[in-house]
Image: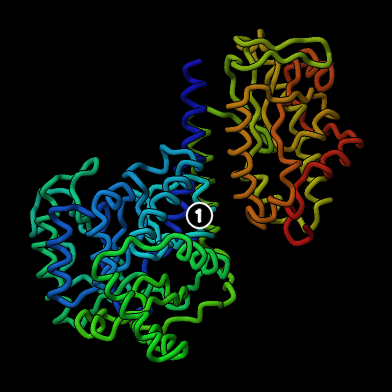
Amino acid sequence: MVEGIIWVVFIFYLIYTLVPTFLIRRLGYGVFKSRSDSPCAALTFDDGPDPQYTPQLLDLLARKGTRATFFVLGAKAEHYPDLIRRMHEEGHLVGLHNYMHHSNALMTPWKVRRTLEHSADVIERITGIRPVHYRPPWGVFNVFDFLLIRKFRIVLWSMAAFDWRSRGGTDKIKRKLIGKVKDGAVILLHDSGDTLGANPDAPGYMIEALADVLEDARRRGIRFARIDEHLPGRRLPERLVRRSAEKRTALPAASSPRDQASQAAGKAAAGAHGPRGAGQAAATVRDPQAAGGAAALHRPRATGEAASVKLPQPAVEAAPAREAPQSQPPPREKHRGLALRAWMLWERLFHRLYRIQPGDSEHRFLHYRIRAYHGQELILEDGEIIRPGDKVAELHLDNEWLRQAGSQSSSMMKLAVQMIRAMGNSMPRLAHRLLTDPALADLKGVYGISMIHRGTKQFGFTVLPLHNRLWRWSSTLYLRVLLGMLHPGGFGRLQENTARLNPRIIAMSASQMKKRYAPGLSAAEPSSGGYYPEEAYGAVLQELPEGVAGKGG
């Protein structure tokens, strides 16, 4: 029982957070980490704002004429709105870092979405601009964060100074950065030290070291820009531009006396120059928070205000407000190959850890492991019942075989024929191996959980629903991720067949296996021949996801 619980928890976190974090962080799927052709680097600061260190950092950036990106916590933004307002007014980009510094791996997808929306509302009320750039705490994702790619620009990093620890002081940070910052780099730093694992005084060392880092970069001709300037050509979808404009109309920014003076002067300018003149005045100073240069939503500023408070201008021209969304390029084939190789490595490790054995020395289609059954009571069609505690052989398909067969088959029919032949060849040998082993004299039967189960009845299996909700949910998620990895068309094609992709228990009693596959049992293993029920062909064809066979699919 304990082993089963540990296994369920491990599989859950493997699918929920480990696999998506690997795919996103290592392969860069759907996120921005660096840009080799960018003419500048990017400074990014997480975990703020902090009432002690963020003002010091802003003072340093102002003295050096450097603009940066701040990924802030929504809760802190609520407590220190003046710091958020100052970031915005001094030309820095304000992004999201969750409402609290909690990992996405420990939150449900609904809570992640809810806290992000709340944090975005907080920042929008302060600055008048809705943030769209997002960095999750610790760079950890859950599987549903892939959906956030449609709504947010997810930003990671290419360089980290490990500045959240005081050990090593300023020298450690200088060694990490001086002489190593280059164009296109995204540098991770922290302006607060009150999160889990950080030292409270660490930001002080970071600010002290950053002064020398900026001076070194100046001598080497490296300049810094905000993340949205780092991403020329990345446009917001029109629906987000429209939504941002609507929300800004409904939710006016929390205005300081300076903002109120600016707005009054803007109205005066509009009255003096007419509608056309007002539009030109508004376009004179672009809003520094326009995400990716795409929003192009301007606020009028007084001429005197613009002269006294000069906002650094983006290096690239702002895009028109209504630009058609650009399609994102598909993941590179080499990335898919890397992910597949990583998954197959996990498969081999899993087989070793759990001592999974081949069911047929000649054909590697089926594997098994002997264990005590833990699960719902299985009432089989031949009247036998498999109960918790019975000794069973747990069946596993060889996913490497399935991947190779799918990539080499030119049509679904050919893949179905291969699977039926492999099953027909493997079952007699598996039955002989299990039924002639003296240690398995009390074997009750065999069982497994599979997405491809309709053709199994013709091989003697009973197909049963999976009653345990948690086990059904985790199995569905795991098997769909698995099929998405193996499917030549990836996860997108599988979305068209989700109604068919529901896991079922397949089980067969030892007596049924002996009757069907080894009626005249002897010590000699079957050397040739197989079991090929013709009626299985159509059932297996109905079960296979469309396109799983490759070219002909």
Q: Is residue 28 visible?
A: no
Q: Residue 526, can we see it? A: yes
Rendered position, 79 above or below 459 = below
Residue 194's spot in the image, x, y percent?
A: 19, 44
Query: Residue at 66% of width from left, 10% of height from top?
Result: 387
What is the x, y in percent for residue 193? 18, 48
Question: Please, is residue 121 above or below residue 427 in the view?
Answer: below
Relative to the observer, which residue lies in front, 133 or 477? 133
Q: Which residue is found at the position 43% from the left and 62% from the top?
A: 132
Drawn side of residue 211 relative to residue 108, left or right: left
Q: Quadrant of residue 285?
A: bottom left
Secondary structure category for the residue under label 1: helix
- The residue type indicated by label 1 comes to Leu
Residue 478 picture quarter: top right
Screen quadrant of the C terminus: bottom right
- Give the side of residue 10 with respect to residue 137, left or right: right
Judge by depth and name the residue closer to the eye, 300 or 122.
300
* Residue that mark 1 sits on: 148
Q: Is residue 295 left or right of residue 438?
A: left
Query: 546 or 403: which is nearer to us?
Result: 546
- Rendered position, 260 above or below 391: below
Q: Residue at x 44, y 63 (%)?
A: 153
Residue 219 lies in quadrant: bottom left
